[in-house]
Image (cartoon, coloured by chain):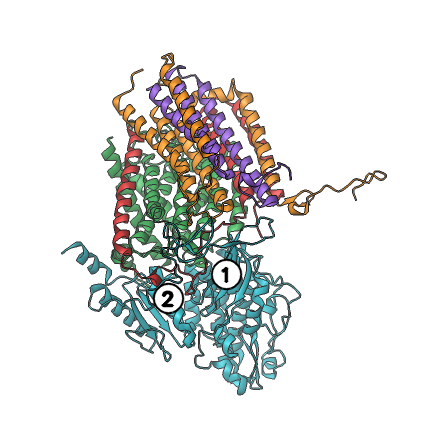
Amino acid sequence: MNPGLLSYFLVSAFGIGAVVSGWLVFRTDSMLRAAYWLMVSFVAVGAMLVVLDAQFLGLILILMMSGEMTIMAIFMIMFMMNPAGLNPMTMVHQHRTSMVAGVGSFLVLAWVGVVAEFPDRPAPAVDPTAALGEELLGRSMLIFESAGVALLAVMIGAIALAAKRGRFGDADAGSVEPEIDVDTGSRT
Amino acid sequence: MVGIGAALIVFVALLLTVGAAQWVWAATGENDSTVPERVPFAGGAEPEFHAWNRFHIRYYAMALLFLAFDMEMVFMYPWAVVFVRQGLLALIEMLMFILILVVGMVYAWREKSFEWD
Amino acid sequence: MGLKARLVHLARTGEVPVFAVVGGGYRSAMHQLRHADGIRIVTSPRHASVLLIAGTFTEAATETVNRVHDQMAGPRVTVGWGHREPMLAPTRANPAGDTSEIAAVIRRQFHDVVTGAIQPEPPLLPDVDPVEWRGVGPYGHGGTGMTGGTPYGRPLALRAPDRDGLELDQVPVTIGPWFAGFPPGLALRVSLQGDVAQAVEVVTTSVVSSGPPGVFTRALHEPTPIRDLEMARARHHLEWMADTLLIAGADRLSLRADRLAETIQPGDVEHVTRLTAAARRSLLRLMTLRGVGVLSADIDMVGLGPVARAAGFSDDRRTPEPAYRDIGFQPVTHDVGDAWARFAQRAAEAAQAVDLAARAGSHRAFGSGEVEAPDGHHQAGETGPADRLTSMLDAVLPGMEWGDLVTTVQSLDIDMESVFFGRPPT
Amino acid sequence: MIDLLLVIAAAVFGIGVYGALSQQSFVMIMMGLELMLNSAVLVVVTFWWGTTGGNPSGQLLVIVILAVMAVEAAIGFALVTAVYRSRKADITEKLRRLRF
Amino acid sequence: MTTLGIGIQVAAMLVGGAYVLAVADRLIGGSGSNVRSAFSYPVKRLSFLMLQPVTTTERPDLAAWILAPSLLLGLAAVGAVSIPIGGPSPGGDIPAGLVLFGAAMLIVLVAVFIFGWAPNSVLPMIGGYRFAAMVLSIGIPFSLVVLTTAIPAESLSVGTIVESQSSLWYLLVQPLGLPIYLITAAAIAFWGPFDLPEGTDLAGGIVAEASGARLAMWRFARAALMVTLSLMGAAVFLGGYLGPVLPGWLWTVIKTAVLLILLALTGRTMARIRVQRFVWFGWVVLLPLALVDVFVSGWVAL
């Protein structure tokens, strides 16, 4: 494996971008900016994946996250007080502990990354997308289909949780199941 | 690699040049504006509140549905590439997958997630 | 030639973006100006360079017109068109002539201000903050705590309950009186929760003043040729259709309706029905109007003219009129009573009016102190249907998405001149 | 190259940990989680590219992480909506009990 | 093909296409003007907007407001880079070009949303939220119909997809594809009758507070986006640069112009759709149709 100088440069640049924008997520008062800084972080990681010859994965990460981050922005603006940060605010707790945990996990992981020895088996230059497709339809078919079932569960669960109108009436009215009349078996 | 590199370079170059040009324009334009000139337009009336608020979207259930279907797209890209090679098997597997998701869509439709009157 | 000089050279003969403030007596004329050569009526003053003040207003309009004036991006020029005392803003020119004259004046003024021959107008309102806020908060932004104070001069919106069960912010916002989606002069204070109006209040200050009396006002007091009445009715309905199509984004059809309103002759039924068919083909019914703004059955519709007839009430002051009976008048009605029914109703009435005008001969009608105007039943000395429609808005509009709200207001055909002065439009 | 990538991933992960632990608002906590998953994607692709000889299972793992993100986001938002509906609360401090 | 070459090619296509679109739109929707003035109209309008001062509002998110037009233009250009214009270019080919295009078109949502949010004004903000509702409803069918063209081509590279149409255009093989694509593309470019975020009922919506150079940049970026979408439509459904006699780039230009004019025609003649009707339409009509398109085309390709 012998990545060129350009790859090093690009990975470093995108890496700094991913870290800085990730940090800015928690440093801005505007919810819109927080969501889109997170998106920038994802896009930077996606770009790094492209540099690592995983073009499809990098681009699909960007595609997924652009949609998801707009939804995130919409939900954050919907539920956060003062969503545009017109009054500056700090909404943090256990700040010191979190900081220690964050720095600690960075140091441990980075140490592992730098010290550990990894085998050097670079990916061959075949079309990785086709390989992924064959994996998906062949060996890992079960993963693929169970992902479908999981997504169905998510859809139904999310709608049932979020929607106002439950099966047994409005959520704020309790949405209580009617009691069953034992004698006749019918619902009252 | 030239193609994707060109995409990156074109994107960054446009973002920087157009952004810088607009920044210069905005910096030269706003300094001398008066307070009434900056009032947001609402047909002549003056706003009482900031427009930024906890904006109540009515389509949140639909937005969550989109997340699930977006994931479906991720599976479909590699599927499309190997479809012809894999033949009928690929068709049936994806049909199963999609049918599972369509159940969710029908459920959302029945729960009136696509309307907000 | 420098870059700026080159741009000026190109821009000075370009199309003029005009923001129009329309007062008494000039609604119809504005429809013709809309397709004058080299003029583009824009919906936001931020796109405009020329402010056109057409017609007559009351003193109360001064503040809003001045605000719109200051919101224009510029280089600003104000032009009057038949604008009379009280003058709302200093105007460079104030002709009272026809469309081609005012268009020429606007183009001239635009040319002069772009080339620098005349100075652009300075802002009119004083440069003071709406409230004291600078330096109040810890960052000079005017607020304290999460949502307190008036950061940057305005408070933050407050929470309010909602039928959805999510108690999120509700922003009361006054839209109008010069908002393109509403009839000129109408201002609504809408409490918006997201894009849904939770409460609607009509701002009752009169800003437009009364223009010269039209043919229906004359018909209140003296018998008037049916031919004149019906042609005025057809023109009114066609202009209303043009407005509806414009708000619905079908610019080309809107233009066609305006031109038809200008050129229509008695007996041109074919033209009107073809326009209606084209509107139907543009999917106006399917995409925009169907099911919007249905008036509930408990509203008293007597005398509301096309609005009532679109909901199935065969109520028309022309029915008992002998002259109308002689030429075989029968009121048309539609059912459902949604925005599409009102569109179809007015289109059908425009076609019927053109037909009646052709068959009217020398018949005269009304003069009894009562008249069936395009917006409904008027009586001398009484407030008209527009006033009743306006007072209905706060009950009808809440719960609607913003676009549906605008569609509904437009579909009711409220003329503010009529609301404030109690006499028929046109 | 692998070292560099892993250090970057560790930094993103550390920020995610900080965010998930320090933020009061539900949605901001989810942002921290997403950042951690983001770094996981980077690590998986790094190993796929450098050490596994292009084993397609590595790619599939990335797709699975993406699916996890989508699931986390969708259920997370739905829960936030449900909690807000019943408690009018958008921050963790306002919840003492986790039942409706 | 070098990076510079690709850049020049894309710039020429976007500027030229934007001009064609502006003239066509003017001829179709303009009021009482003659044909000759339509050709100078875009230039004069642009000149005036460049002269006009850029207004601001009381407390805008200025960074977002500045970023949005640049982002929109950048996305249009990135989308265009993934499409071969003059002929096969092995060097400039992007293996996952379709995904790049799809990602760029989804991020358009971000640009429009922040453009509506930035001025801190009610009407533009509603416009931005309307666009979010629109893209979330048609994003999936849009991606699906584009992806369907990759099935017979067995590749996500747009160049390969064009090449695989040498015997028959996908317009004919996948008859559902182009109509769904055009509807969804018009919605993604918020072009009439789907110009909900810029509707008259919002006094211009997202652009209600934009003036001068900012408006000019936004208008140009939107036109460029329309060109990119038409380019992609021409490439994956109409065989791109393939065609007899004429050089390849000219075929691309002709096919793109045809699609642009088609979009311009519907833009000014159809009534704007209600946002709720659109959400319903996207999920209940377009998405199932797109799925049918995928599976029927897949069956045919076997």
Q: Secondary structure at mark 2?
A: helix
Q: Earlier in the sequence, mark 1 or mark 2?
A: 2
Percent coordinates x, y for residue C296 in the rendering:
64, 63
Q: Report the disc number at residue C406.
A: 1
Residue D42 as seen in the image, left or right of residue C37:
right
> Residue extending furthest bottom?
C222
From the image, state the color of chain C.
Answer: cyan
Reply above or below: A39 against A119: below
Of circles 1 and 2, the one toward us is 2
Q: Which chain is purple?
A: D
> Residue extending furthest right?
A183
Amino acid tagged 2: Arg
Q: Report the disc number at residue C271.
A: none
Q: CA distance from mark 1 to mark 2?
A: 22 Å
Label 2: which residue? C67
From the image, state the color of chain E.
Answer: green
Choose between A132 and C156: the one closer to the eye: C156
Choose between A1 and A95: the one closer to the eye: A95
Label 1 Cα crowd, 10 Å radius (few <14 / some 14-19 / many 20+):
many
Give the letter of the chain under mark 1. C
Residue shown at 75%/42% (left/top)? A178
From the image, state the color of chain A.
Answer: orange
Q: Secondary structure at mark 1?
A: helix
Do the dots labelled 1 and 2 sit on one chain? yes
Quadrant (top left/top right/bottom left/bottom right) for the N terminus of chain C? bottom left
| Tags 1 and 2 touching, CB below 8 Å | no
From the image, state the color of chain B.
Answer: red
